[in-house]
Amino acid sequence: MYASPRLIIPLVGVLLVTLLAAAPASAKRDIAVGFADDVFADNLFFQPDSSDRAGWARRLGRTKAGLVRLNVYWARVVSSSEPADATIVDQPAYDWSEIDRALWATSAQGVEPLLTVLTAPRFAEGPKRPSDEEARPGTWKPSAEKLREFAIALATRYSGNYPDPLNPGETLPRVRYYEGWNEPNLHRYITPQRTKKGKNRSPDIYRKLLNGFYEGIKSVRSSNRVLAAGTGPFGDPEGELRIPPLEFWRDVFCLKNRKKLKFKRKGCPQRKDRAQLDIFAHNAINSPGDGPTVSAQLRDNATAADMDELVDVIRAAEKHGTVRPGGKREVWATELWFESNPPEKDGARLNKHARRMAEALYVLWKQKVSAGIFLQLRDSPYDPKSPAVVGLQSGVYFLDGTPKPALEAVRFPFVAERKSRGRVIAWGKSPASGGLELERKRARGGWERVARVRVNGGEVFKEELKLREEERLRARVGKSKSISWKVGGQ
C-alpha cells in the first residue's frame, strides 16, 4: 500500500488544507469487523427457513464483515443423556443441525465463523449443585474434562474434512476460530463467582475449563485458533454475582498490583496448568446510551474505551509466563452494541448511531485491538417495556430488513479526529481497492477533494491533514461514500 503524489489545495480565504509530507497511506495495523448471532435472540442463521437464512446472509455480506460469531449451546447440541464417547461426532446424542445451517449460510458469503461454546449439559456440571434459582442451568462448576471431549467432537465436525450428511460428496465448512465460553466473570455463565466470604472462585474454575477446551480444539488441528471467553464489562466489587473483568483476568493470570501487574506466586498453578489461549478477548460494551469513548466509572470495569488496560494485562501475563503458549497474541472485542432511535426512544438518533459504530472501531484500533464484533446485525422486535439490555435495537438493519445509516458506517468506517491545532487524523477502512479521495463539504453545497491516496480493500488507512477551520469530511472510493464526520476548527 502506498501514497500517491500529494495534492495541494489552494488557499480558500483563511483555510489551508494539505497532506503532511510524511503521512502514510496505510496504517498497517488492521481491524476485522464482525457480527454475532444467537439461536435464542435474532436467530437469523440457525433457523430452518433456508430462504430467510440466505436473505440475512446476503445482508451480512453487504456489511463487508470478515467475522460472524455464532453461539454454540453445548447443552442444546447434546441430549440429556451423556454420550458413551463424547469425542465421536456421529452418534444419536448429538444434534448439529442448527450449527450446520448457520455455517452453510454465512460461509456462502465468505465470512469467517467464530464458534462460541457455552452452557454445560446437566451431566457435565459439578457436584453438590444448588437449585436453578441459585445457579442457572449450565453454569455450575462445568467439567473441564467433559468440555475437552465435546471440543474434540466439535472441531472434528468442522475440520473442513467431515462429510456433510445432507449433501453427499460435500464436506461441512471449515471453522478455524473457537471461543471457550462467554462472560465467565458473571454468574449468568459460571457459578459460583465468589464464596460468601468474598474469595474469588470463578477465575480458577474458568482457567481449568479454558485449558480443557484448548486441548480438545487443538488436538484436532493445531492450526485452529482458541479465544479466551470475552468477559462482561461490569462487575460488583463487593458482591457475589459479578467480578470486574480486570480483577478476574488478574486472578486467571496470577497477577497482582493492578498498576504494576507483578507475578503473584502464591496460589499460582504450576506452569503446565496455566491458562492456554491463542487470542485474548473481552466484550467491550458501554452502558446503554453511552458512546464508545466513555470509560467505565468503577475501578476494574472496562468498556470499549478501556481496552488498553486489558491489553496491558495480557502483555503482563505474556511477560511473566502465566499464559501459554509463549509469544504475543491478538486482542479482540467480541461484543459491542449501541442502540438507535428509532426504534429505541433512549437510543442515539440514526446518524449519531452510525458515527458511534464507526468510532467504536477507531477507538479499539487505537488501543491495538484486532477485531470488533457487533451485536447485532438486525434489531430485535421492539418492546418499550423491556429492560435496557433485553431486545436490543442495535442492528445495522431495522427489523424489516431496511438498512440504517449504520450499515454504511461498518461497511466503510470513517472517522475524522482533531489531534492538535491545525492537525486532523482521517482514519477509515476502505471497502474496495483503488484511489480513495478525502473530501470536504463546500460552504455553498457539494463536496471537493482535499487528498487522494491509494488503498487496498478491507484494509485500514490513516492520513494526517492540515486543517484549521471547522469542516465536515468524508471518504470516497469508486461509488462508495463513507458517512461524514464534523471536526471543529482551531
Image (tube, rainbow, N blue to C red):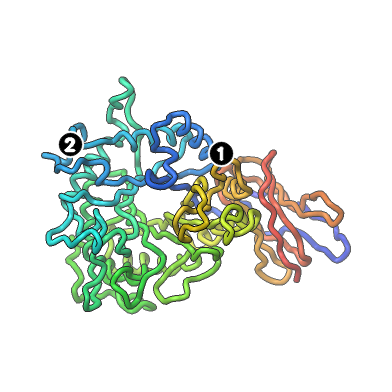
**Quarter of the figure with the C terminus:** bottom right
Mark linked to residue 62:
1
Where is residue 420 drawn, in percent x and y?
Answer: 68, 71
Q: Amino acid at mark 1?
A: Arg
**For residue 468, side relative to residue 155 (left or right):** right
Mark 2 lies on residue? 88
Viewer-proximal residue, 432 or 153?
153
- Mark 2, Cα crowd under 10 Å, few <14 / some 14-19 / many 20+, is some
Placement of 421 over or under 206, stated as above or below: below
SS under mark 2:
loop
Where is residue 192 drawn, in percent x and y?
Answer: 23, 66
Q: Residue at x 49, y 64 (%)?
A: 286
SS under mark 1:
helix
- Mark 1, Cα crowd under 10 Å, few <14 / some 14-19 / many 20+, is some
- Label 2 to label 1: alpha-carbon separation: 37 Å
Query: Which sits earlier in the primary sequence, circle 2 or circle 1?
Result: 1
